[in-house]
Amino acid sequence: VYFSGVIQVQQGAYPAALEQFEACASLPAPDRRREELRELCQLAVGRILYEAGRYGEAIDRYQEVGRDSPRPCSGPARS
């Protein structure tokens, strides 16, 4: 699902990519590896929303990524 979203972003199909990343972000994460994948999807959703000017929604998605995540937030700064 994640890579489908990546391909759609590369093709400029942002609404379809957003759907893929949202689906990926909602999958269960029974282990750390899948949690990291879910975090990547949440960051991708945040990025697409940010680029679309939907800043409040983007911030909400960025904040769903845990503070202990090894992935730095690539959007607005966390408070």
Image (tube, rainbow, N blue to C red):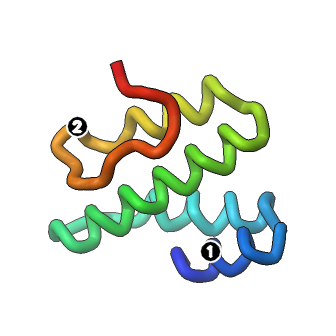
Question: Which of these two is toward me, 13 or 25?
Answer: 13
Q: Secondary structure at mark 1?
A: helix
Q: As shown in the figure, which amino acid type bears the numbered disc 2?
A: Arg
Instruction: Specify the label residue 61 is tagged with.
Output: none
Residue located beneath label 1 in the image: 6
- At x 38%, y 62%, the residue is 38
In this view, 37 is above or below 56: below
Q: Quadrant of the N terminus?
A: bottom right
| Residue 72 picture location, percent across and down | 33, 47
Q: As shown in the figure, which amino acid type bears the numbered disc 1?
A: Val
| Residue 21 picture location, percent across and down | 57, 63
Q: Earlier in the sequence, mark 2 or mark 1?
A: 1
Q: Is residue 65 left or right of residue 42?
A: left
In this view, 25 is above or below 6: above
Q: Residues within 10 Å of mark 1 (few under 14, many from 20)?
A: some
| Residue 43 picture location, percent across and down | 48, 51
Q: Quadrant of the C terminus?
A: top left
